[in-house]
Image: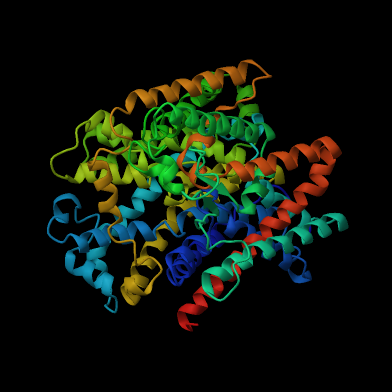
């Protein structure tokens, strides 16, 4: 390949074509998988639950880099074009995957079908079609009544695109601080850049190629046997994936285990890609997580158990140790109520204190936007930015106003409409930073992120469901925080990751912004239309998402029982979590010797890190990274460790691509 000039025109036409093609192919790939677990783990976009493994970007970059070795394509496939490909694919994977838009569309139409009489009281017609259309959607084999679907399509498109544009405007404003000043690493983006540099560089790197190839084979050796256990019952369970192991690779402790007496031990992660990504994360964040996990979850829980708390926890299997009703589960039981203290308070607190720490940067950018700084300084500040700060702030204000107006038009009160973007920011600002540090999406918001609505608007559960209550609780829980692949968080994750890639590759940030914006506008619309057409044609029962009916009612029912975020009182615990993060932020900023980063506290005490048992992969990663740096220094880490990790993760994602392809083949030719 050849080096390309920085700048030039963004490939907008290719982005549009990519949105149309991937919106159709991505939805088909997900829906045609033989079962739900396969759709979660072997879709084209991302995998491994909260790890959010970048399947689409890694595979696209690997295949494109291989094609770039052929003479006719060498001039076209270069560092710039591969960076643009990454900018598109990292955004696309968040707008079309197992969750978005498939679960959302199926969930709301399934609600109408499952509760045909009462659902009209709390699900407006612009959110879901009539009962008759819903039944035809479930059954399949009917022509699509696009006229009845039109209001729903527009509503669901706007609920994804409007907040995405707001999130993208925030990333434009803070790009320089995150990427150039603080240099947030984004480990999964580092893998993408290493892949491009190693396979697409002009110079030959025999050692890199050898180590990458070894890692590639190891990735296949891990992922392919795991895939085979899902598809072929006769295949030997090499890694014990069928025994007490969740789909994300967290092996749970059983009541008859020799380790059952450790009250706080829920799972241990045995999925190697988590350790490979952790190897690329800052060692201090890994150590912070381990200190908080062993100090708070293991030792703290054991002490509490000795003093009479968590009664019966040692007789419960894995996930129940966290999620069971009080007094057993760590999630909602005294004395810690970690769902409020760790996850809610931790994540919200970190967003608040990150904003406070950025106050001088915010003031400078606002003054630059208003023209209150010297013109030369403004030019220096805006150098390499996607747009001027004035344009960025105008975009942020305009998208925010339109987003709030959208909720007002949907029947929300003014307070309810304002709380929606506030939820987006408080949840995803800090979780995007944590993803940027360790490559792991910590949030699992369906258990807590409706807290603003519960605390400020409905401290008492209403006697009957209303459209505003239903939409606010459900949307805040799912879009607002339950994994970035639901849509909202993905815009922040992908835009900051794309700017990180552009910074390492020396490519125009403006072009990256254009690709991200076009993808955020077009791909959700195509994906929604493709999903409705495919399920209406096939019938829900023939797709991988057939069990998703009733999900909305289940979520609303959990809130109605008073168990979310925890049983009352939960506000004092959430405030305590905010204070803890504030103290950790102060200590970490003030004293160089202080070992605990607030991100480590959140990673140690939140839902999915505990359920996926990331403490063990992080422990392995921390030992491996520390040993590598102490024995061979940074050169050994960069020349040996990084190529191996890159190859391993690429082998994993290529295996996922092959496995998903076999899953689609199984739909047409059952075996």
**Residue at the (57%, 53%) spot, across then down:** 53
Residue 215 left/right relative to 323: right
Quick one: 34 or 13, which is closer to the camera?
34
**Residue at the (39%, 58%) spot, across then down:** 101
Quick one: 352 or 217, which is closer to the camera?
217
Return the x and y of residue 486 as percentages of the image width and height.
42, 51
Residue 345 in the image: above or below residue 317: above
Whether residue 223 is visible to the viewer of this picture, yes or no, is: yes
Return the x and y of residue 326 as percentages of the image width and height.
33, 37
The residue most toward the top is 590
Q: How is the image coloured?
A: rainbow
Quadrant in which residue 566 is drawn: top left
Return the x and y of residue 1 as percentages of the image width and height.
78, 60
Residue 437 in the image: above or below residue 67: above
**Residue at the (75%, 37%) spot, across then down:** 626
Residue 545 left/right relative to 357: left
Return the x and y of residue 72 as percentages of the image width and height.
75, 71
Residue 495 left/right relative to 481: right
**Residue at the (70%, 43%) spot, across then down:** 504
Quadrant in which residue 332 is drawn: top left
């Amino acid at each position: 390949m050849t080096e390309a000039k920085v700048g030039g025109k963004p490939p907008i036409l290719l982005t549009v074509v990519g949105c149309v093609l991937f919106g159709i192919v991505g939805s088909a790939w997900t829906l045609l998988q033989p079962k739900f677990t396969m759709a979660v783990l072997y879709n084209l976009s991302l995998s491994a639950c909260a790890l959010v493994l970048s399947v689409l970007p890694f595979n696209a970059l690997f295949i494109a880099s291989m094609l770039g070795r052929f003479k006719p394509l060498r001039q076209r496939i270069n560092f710039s074009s591969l960076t643009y490909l990454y900018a598109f694919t990292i955004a696309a994977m968040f707008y079309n995957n197992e969750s978005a838009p498939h679960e959302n569309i199926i969930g709301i139409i399934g609600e109408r079908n499952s509760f045909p009489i009462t659902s009209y009281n709390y699900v407006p017609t612009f959110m879901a079609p009539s009962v008759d259309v819903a039944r035809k959607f479930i059954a399949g084999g009917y022509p699509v009544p696009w006229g009845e679907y039109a209001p729903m399509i527009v509503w669901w498109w706007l609920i994804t695109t409007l907040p995405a544009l707001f999130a993208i405007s925030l990333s434009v404003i803070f790009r320089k601080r995150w990427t150039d000043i603080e240099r947030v690493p984004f480990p999964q983006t580092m893998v993408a850049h290493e892949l491009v540099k190693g396979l697409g560089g002009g110079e030959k790197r025999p050692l890199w190629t050898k180590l990458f190839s070894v890692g590639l084979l190891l990735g296949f050796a891990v992922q392919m046997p795991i895939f085979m256990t899902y598809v072929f019952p006769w295949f030997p369970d090499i890694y014990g994936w069928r025994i007490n192991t969740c789909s994300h690779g967290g092996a749970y402790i059983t009541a008859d285990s020799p380790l059952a007496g450790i009250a706080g031990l829920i799972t241990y992660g045995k999925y190697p890609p988590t350790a490979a990504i952790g190897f690329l994360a800052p060692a201090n964040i890994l150590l912070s997580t381990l200190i908080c996990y062993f100090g708070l979850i293991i030792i703290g829980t054991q002490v509490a158990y000795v003093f009479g708390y968590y009664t019966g926890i040692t007789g419960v299997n894995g996930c129940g140790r966290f999620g069971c009703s009080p007094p057993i589960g760590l999630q909602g039981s005294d004395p810690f109520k970690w769902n409020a203290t760790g996850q809610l308070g931790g994540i919200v607190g970190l967003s608040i204190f990150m904003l406070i720490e950025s106050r001088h940067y915010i003031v400078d950018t606002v003054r630059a936007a208003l023209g209150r700084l010297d013109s030369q300084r403004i030019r220096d500040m805006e150098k390499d930015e996607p747009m001027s700060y004035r344009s960025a702030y105008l975009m942020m204000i305009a998208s925010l106003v339109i987003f709030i107006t959208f909720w007002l038009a949907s029947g929300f009160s003014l307070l309810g409409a304002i709380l929606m973007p506030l939820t987006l920011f408080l949840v995803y600002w800090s979780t995007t930073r944590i993803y940027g540090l360790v490559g792991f999406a910590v949030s699992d918001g369906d258990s807590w992120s409706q807290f603003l609505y519960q605390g400020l608007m409905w401290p008492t559960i209403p006697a009957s469901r209303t459209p505003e209550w239903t939409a606010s609780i459900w949307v805040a829980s799912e879009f607002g925080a339950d994994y970035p692949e639901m849509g909202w968080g993905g815009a922040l994750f992908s835009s900051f990751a794309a700017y990180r890639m552009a910074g390492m590759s020396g490519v125009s940030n403006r072009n990256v912004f254009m690709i991200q914006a076009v993808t955020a506008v077009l791909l959700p619309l195509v994906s929604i239309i493709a999903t409705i057409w495919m399920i209406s044609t096939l019938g829900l029962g023939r797709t991988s998402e057939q069990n998703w009916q009733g999900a909305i009612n289940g979520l609303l029912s959990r809130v109605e029982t008073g168990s979310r975020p925890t049983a009352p009182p939960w506000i004092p615990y959430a405030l305590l979590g905010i204070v803890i993060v504030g103290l950790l932020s102060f200590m970490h900023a003030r004293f160089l010797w202080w070992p605990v980063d607030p991100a480590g506290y959140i990673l140690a005490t939140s839902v999915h890190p505990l359920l996926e048992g990331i403490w063990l992969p992080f422990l392995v990663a921390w030992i491996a990274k520390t040993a590598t740096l102490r024995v061979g220094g940074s050169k050994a880490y960069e020349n040996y460790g990084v190529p191996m990790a890159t190859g391993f993760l690429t082998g994993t994602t290529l295996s996922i691509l092959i496995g998903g392809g076999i899953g689609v083949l199984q739909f047409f030719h059952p075996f």
